[in-house]
Every structure is written in structure tokens, then in C-alpha cells.
Amino acid sequence: MSSKEKPHLNLVIIGHVDHGKSTMTGHLLYLCGSVSDRDLQKFEKEAELIGRGSFKFAWVLDKLKEERERGVTIDLAFYKFETKKYYYTIIDAPGHRDFVKNMITGTSQADAAILVVSAGTGEFEAGVSSTGQTREHALLAKTLGVDQVLVAVNKMDLADYKQERFEEIKNEMERNLKLFGFDMKKVEFVPASGMKGDNLDKKPDSMPWYTGPTLLDALDQFEIPPKPMDKPLRLPIQDVYTITGIGTVPVGRVETGVLKPKEEVIFQPTGKKAAVVSIEMHHENIAEAIPGDNIGFNCKGLSKKDVRRGDVVGHATKPPTIAKEFTATVQIIRHPSAVAAGYTPVIHCGTAQVATRFAELKSKTTKGETTAKPDFLKNGDGAEVLMIPTRDMVIEQYADFPQLGRFAVRDMGQTVAVGIVKKVTPK
């Protein structure tokens, strides 16, 4: 069965810095044949030259990132791999400097996630501490609509492949994931070593106590999410490229609806209209793009200044909603003090990042008790808040377009709260 016929899923790989995401991902790509032996030998030589031979798998991704940053090629081919059942695209390989910003954009495009946690002594604990990213990434994934998560307990070689360590991590992570609303019956925990390759594609001798699936087999337990094709088109823009001989090419993922060439689309919030000339996915022209497709498309008369990351494309007849204000249910997760009316953090919705004012605190719920018009909100509080964006942005009601009706609130370099849009007052 070729990748053409296999169902396609977008996968994001998340987790605390240094828990081995890049190494594990590079090794997986190698085992799945997406990276050749020759490439790997080349990377190994380069890594050895700087005395980091063990980094050869991580280099697979770093070399590609460098290429992408230099703009030599926008080639996502390397990030594709196949399991028995699916073919996967890995979104935005991990390890970016401004990781969470990219992670939010990447995660908002994902169907499923691998959450990588290290079994190394002290490393797992650092990841789940209040300054660590393990819990934040898991919560963000959930808020951004990724309900399918596989937990890879990586670096088992550092824990001498001990079952006790695996169970300890599993129990702690189960507690957290349950709290964030994941269905624990569907979350698989897989012990592995990204560096050594244990349990990535073959059952290892090192963990005779483990009876579950390998990492690759566990990926086949994911399900294809429903594709809302009957809804109006919503396509958040991820990036805009200028390609010689073609022109301006916006890139993004279709969230709802269907896009076809020759259709007139509108870019919101700017209101720029254009006719679609062609649509491309994985370097091939396609006749239509449906939900879940990561595409580039070319429009007549569109210049690079007309469109930017964060814009949302819809059909000109059913444009995306520009919000004058909106009411949302907000959950405060991690704020160092308290949140009062007037607070203006940055919210991330789709691919947009816009400073938004908490204009009015309508009510709050603390431990099951609801208070009208509270003075402030603190960690653990849920609240109904009237919010006013400081500049034009597209945001939709969660009931109509869940993909554009949920958001993360970020401030001081961390995720402070998450929210769901109840009602939008259009501009």
C-alpha cells in the first residue's frame, strides 16, 4: 500500500527541552526509511567532527532546519514516514529556540502528539516541575484540540531499563493527563530509548517486563479525526513564501471546508480578496484541499505584503469572523499573582498571536462555587470573561469552529490560561 492510499495524520512531537525529542524523531525517520544510510553516515561524520557523535539522529533534523532557515528548500519530505497503517507528517520538528510559540502553531495543526518524557534521574522531575515544560505542553495540546496522545518514556537506557522507574513516571503522568481531561483509556505509555533504538520498531531484549506495543505499533492505535467538509472554509495561515516563477504562496492547514482552484477567497482580518490559481500538497498539484491537508496555494494578484501568518482564509461569500469582542470561558492555570480586569496578555488562536484585554470579569467558579463580577482571578479559577483584542483578529465561536474557538493565554514566557469562545460580537 503506497502512502497515496494510506490515511494521513499530522503528528507533533512535544515535551521538555533535552528529553530527547530530536534524537528519537531522527531515529524513527531513519528506521522508517525516510533517511538513508548514506545521509546518516554523513551526519555522523559531521557530528563527530565537533565531538558529538552521539548526536547523529538529532542532526538529521537540525540539518533540515538549517536548510529551511536559509530558505534553500521548503522541503518537508524528510519529515514524512510511514507505519503499517498510516503515513505521517511530523509538524515543525522540535527544538526551536522559541519553542512554545512554534509549538502552539504546530500543535494547532496536529491530529495526534507524542509526548516525550525522559526517564533519566532528575530529568523527568525537572520536566514536571513548575518551571518544566512537560505539563504545559500536554495541557496546550489538549487546549489546542489534540485529544490523541502517546507518551514515550524515553532514555530508558539511563534508568537501566528498570520497570519501577517506568511505572513511577507512568503513574505521575497519568495523574496529570487525567486532570487535563485526556481519556486515559486511549493514552498508551511506551518505554523506549531514542538513542539506542530500543522499542522504537522492535521489541528489545532490554525490557522483558514490557508487554505492550513498540512505538511504531502504538502510532497505529491513533484514529483519523472526523473531517468537517460541510462547514465553511477556514484555513489559518502558517507562513508565506515567495517562490520564483510562481509568486506569493501562503501555506497552512485546512481546518474546515474545502478549497478548490478558481474559487474566490478572502484573507481576514485584512479583507484582501483573491482568486486561487493552484493548490499544492507535498510538491504535487491537487484538485481540492480538505480538512487536515497541509497545503501551499497560489493566488492571482496576491503580494507578500497582503498576507501574513495569523490570517485566516475563507470563501469570499462566507468570510471568517473578525471579532470586535468575545465572551470566553477561561481557566487560569499558572499566573504568578492574580488576574484583574484590564489585564492584556497575548492570546494564541489558530496561528494568530494578538494582545487581548480581559475587559470584564463576568463570573468566576472556584472549587464548584460561582461568584458574579469577581475582582480578580487566581490559579485554578474558571471564569467567564469579556475579551477585547487590541487589533483585528479572526476568532470564532467554539460551537461553530472549535479549531478557531479555543486559545492559549501567554504572558512572561509561559502559558497562563486557556480558553474557549462562547460568543463573538463581529466587527
Image (cartoon, rainbow, N blue to C red):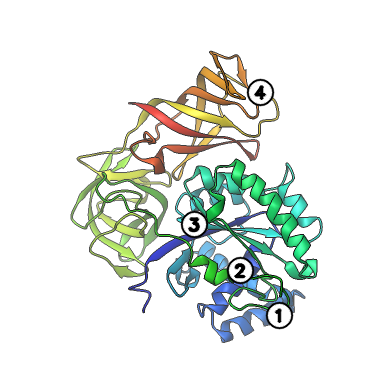
Kindly indicate whether the residue at mark 4 contacts the one at mark 2 (C-beta within 8 angstroms).
no
Q: Say whether residue 412 is left or right of residue 280.
A: right
| Callouts 3 and 4 close, C-beta under 8 Å | no
Q: CA distance from mark 1 to mark 4?
A: 51 Å
What residue type is disc 1 on? Asp
Nearer the observer: mark 3 or 1; the answer is: 1
- Can residue 75 be seen here? The reply is no
State whether residue 414 is above or below residue 107.
above
Which quarter of the rendered picture does the N terminus lie within? bottom left
Foreground: 119 or 427?
A: 119
* Residue of label 2: 212
Label 2: how many Cα within 10 Å (few below 14, some 14–19, many 20+):
some
| Label 3–label 2 contact, CB within 8 A | no
| Residue at image mark 1 | 205
Label 3 or label 2, whichever comes before in sequence order = 3
- Give the mark toward the camera: 3 or 2: 2
Tell me which label, 3 or 4, sits earlier in the chain: 3
Q: What's the residue at 55%, 20% (across, down)?
A: 364
- Per the image, label 2 sits on a secondary structure element best described as loop
Q: Is residue 205 visible?
A: yes
Closer to the N terminus: mark 1 or mark 2?
A: 1
**Residue receiving disc 4:** 338
Q: Separation of disc 3 and disc 2 at Cα?
A: 19 Å
Q: Which residue is mark 3?
A: 112
Q: Residues within 10 Å of mark 3 (few under 14, many from 20)?
A: many
Q: CA distance from mark 2 to mark 4?
A: 44 Å
Dot 2 or dot 4: first in sequence order is 2
